[in-house]
Each structure stands twice: as C-alpha cells, then as structure tokens.
Image: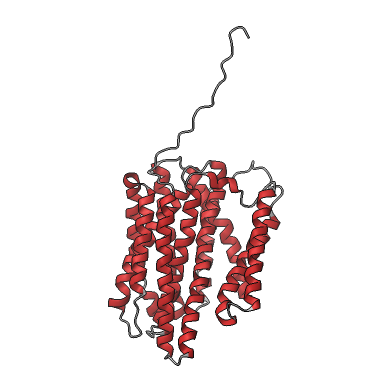
C-alpha cells in the first residue's frame, strides 16, 4: 500500500509542478520580471529541499513517521483552494491526441530497472549475470525509448526542444548537481544517526543552518542575474556545493557537529541555493510559450532523475566500501564511516562536473528575446 500511495503521489507531483512552472513562465514576458519570478521559484524549491530534511526529522522523531505524509494533506487542500481562486482556466484548448503512452512506459521502465540494478549490484555482485542482465535491459529500454520518440507523431520528449540555446546544458547540469546534493543529504543523515548516534529530531535540527543558507543565497543570487547573468551564478554555486561536500567527506568516526559538519553544511547550502535559482532561470530562457510546459517538465524531471541516480550510484559506492572493510574485520562504525566518505567524495565530484557542464548553459541577464520581423518579398509595380 505504501509503495502504491507513493506512486500516486509521484504522478500527482509530476502533473502539478511542471504545470505550475509553465504558468509562471507564460505569465511573465521574457526579461527581468520573469527572471525574478523564476528566481523566487528556484529559491523556494531549494529551500523546500533543505527544509524537508529538517521537518522529516522533527516529525518522525515526534508524532511518528506517518506524519511525514499526513502533513501534506492540509497543504494540498490549501493549494487546491488557491489554484481555483487565482489561476485562470483555459477552456479552449485542443484535445490531446496520440498520447505517447508507449514512450512513457519505456522511459519509466528503463529508469526503474537501471536504478534497481545500481542499488542491488553491491549485494548481488557487479559481474553477476542478474546485474548484467538488468543493466542490459535498462539500456535496451532507454534506446527503444529514443527510437520511439524520433518516430512518434506526438512524442513525449521531442528532441527538437534541445535546439533551444543552452537548454540541454541547463537540464544536464541539474541532473548532475542534484545527483550530488540529494545523495549528500542522504548519506550525511545516515552518518549522523548510525555513527554519531543522533536522534531523528537531532538530525533534523542539524539542517536548520542549511535551510537558512539556502534561503539567503537564493535571494542574493536572483538579484545578481541582471549584473552577472545566470551562468556565473550556477558555476559558482556548483563549485561552492562541491567545496562544502569535500569538507563533509572528511567526516571521522568520532566527529563533532560544530567542527566536522557545520562548516561544510554552510558552504554547501550557499551553493545549493545558487544552483537551484540559476538553473531554473536558465532552463526557461528563450523558451517559446507553446513549449513552456515541456521545458518545465524537463527541469522537474532532471531534478528527480538526478536525485534518484545520485543516491543509487553513491549507495553502490558506499556499500561496496563498507562490505570490503567488514570482510576484513573492521569495526562497524569505521566501515560505515569509510563508506560514507567515499559516497560524499563522489557527490563532491558530481558537483564539480556540474560546474563544467554549466559553462554551456544559457547566460541570461533578463534581456527580452527579440523575434525578428517576418521577411516580406517585394512585389514589382507592374505585377
């Protein structure tokens, strides 16, 4: 039941978030106003990521883990009321024809199989026939998805949108950066609880400075777009995120929050806020109104795809290291810490890679995109 409910929750979020971002994009003309709106959106998303970790610890350590889900009910009810009151309905929209259900099934199945293979490979063995078969199956499904999209009349993911200047680089930056950020939160929480002995409430409270750092940095970053453009903000944010995560990768078995965790968390939080705001704005720059929904869906998919892949890959790295040390009769805490160190190091490398990819992203400062007037063919006077 829990897995089915989470599936339904994911489907709802996949419908809601791109639609909301598309409304935001089409409600503001290309320029500084849209950049400010997108900056606020990106800052809110980054803040929610950090705040969610804190609230998760508070709720699970207090009334119980089920309240992690119950707390969403009044929030969703409020969202429905506000949406019906403020968002204008669009009644004269063409009906959706030839929905690419086959493409959706191929993409979803391929990614699920890939992540499943990565998570289970350390236990089963990378050279095991089962692991090889799962990875091969994922590759076949994703390749079939690409072929299907190229041939379908109404593809789920039209490759033509990638021709928009800088959009592909912005989405790829989001995938790689979120792989690092999400996995970093995951393993740092495990370290605090399983090695340092933090309670769930203490682990959640440990992220309060992170929440404040994301809120402050996202606000500052959105104000700097007009001067620097989005590209330097994204690159600087990814570098800061990587630097903070490399600090966290030094965690010892008998660590201290103030000296071993807090400095890295503060540095990382500044980078997270800048990356979220910058990438969200860059991924919507120059997108025509009829493609706004697709562009919003791509950046949202990039976020969750990166998080899922990052946790899966880092888990494989951490588990392999810990199992190797346990087989050599190392203590449990030492083996866990060493595995977490390897995982956090991989997260930091991912953020540096995101900074490199971001060099190809759009560098919008809020200037409106001017569409050239249509060319007219002169008609001879005696025609």
Total marks placed: 0
166 vs 63, nearest the viewer: 166
What residue lies at 30% left-to-right and 81% top-to-bottom? 256
Residue sitting at the far left = 259
User: In this picture, is 183 found above or below 145?
Assistant: below
Is residue 112 among the parts visible in the rendering? yes
**x%, y% of residue 347?**
43, 69
282 vs 2, nearest the viewer: 282
Residue sitting at the far front = 127
Quadrant of the rendering where the C terminus is positioned: top right
**x%, y% of residue 52?**
44, 68
Residue sitting at the far bottom = 329
What residue lies at 34% left-to-right and 57% top-to-bottom? 236
Residue sitting at the far top = 382
Is residue 40 among the parts visible in the rendering? no
**x%, y% of residue 171?**
49, 54
What residue lies at 46% left-to-right and 40% top-to-bottom? 29
Quadrant of the rendering where the N terminus is positioned: bottom right
What residue lies at 58% left-to-right and 70% top-to-bottom? 115
* Image coloring type: secondary structure
User: In this picture, is 260 found above or below 100?
Assistant: below
**x%, y% of residue 265?**
34, 70
Residue 41, located in which quarter of the rendered image? bottom left
């Amino acid at each position: 039941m829990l897995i089915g409910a989470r599936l339904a929750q994911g489907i709802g979020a996949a419908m809601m978030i791109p639609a909301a971002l598309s409304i935001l994009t089409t409600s503001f003309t290309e320029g500084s106003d849209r950049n400010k709106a997108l900056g606020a959106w990106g800052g809110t998303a980054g803040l929610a990521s950090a705040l969610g970790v804190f609230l998760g610890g508070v709720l699970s350590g207090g009334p119980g883990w089920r309240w992690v889900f119950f707390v969403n009910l009044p929030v969703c009810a409020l969202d429905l009321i506000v949406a019906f009151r403020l968002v204008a309905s669009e009644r004269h929209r063409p009906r959706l024809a030839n929905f690419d259900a086959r493409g959706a099934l191929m993409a979803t199945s391929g990614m699920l199989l890939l992540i499943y293979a990565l998570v289970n490979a350390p236990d089963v063995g990378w050279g095991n026939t089962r692991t090889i078969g799962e990875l091969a199956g994922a590759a076949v499904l994703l390749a079939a998805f690409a072929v299907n999209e190229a041939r379908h009349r109404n593809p789920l993911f039209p490759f033509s949108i990638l021709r928009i200047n800088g959009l592909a680089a912005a989405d790829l930056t989001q995938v790689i950066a979120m792989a690092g950020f999400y996995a970093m939160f995951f393993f740092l929480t495990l370290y605090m609880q399983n090695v340092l002995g933090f309670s769930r409430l203490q682990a959640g409270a440990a992220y309060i400075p992170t929440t404040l750092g994301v809120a402050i940095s996202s606000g500052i970053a959105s104000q700097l777009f007009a001067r620097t453009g989005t590209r330097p903000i994204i690159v600087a944010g990814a570098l800061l995120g990587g630097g903070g995560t490399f600090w966290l990768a030094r965690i010892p078995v008998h660590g201290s929050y103030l000296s071993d965790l807090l400095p890295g968390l503060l540095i990382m939080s500044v980078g997270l806020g800048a990356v979220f705001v910058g990438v969200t704005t860059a991924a919507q720059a120059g997108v025509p109104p009829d493609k706004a929904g697709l562009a919003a869906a791509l950046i949202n998919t990039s976020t969750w795809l990166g998080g899922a892949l990052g946790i899966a890959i880092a888990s494989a790295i951490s588990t392999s290291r810990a199992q190797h040390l346990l087989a050599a009769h190392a203590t449990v805490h030492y083996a866990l810490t060493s595995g977490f160190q390897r995982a956090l190091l991989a997260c930091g490398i991912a953020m540096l890679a995101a900074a490199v990819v971001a060099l190809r992203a759009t560098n919008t400062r809020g200037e409106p995109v001017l569409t050239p007037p249509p060319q007219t063919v002169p008609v001879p006077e005696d025609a």
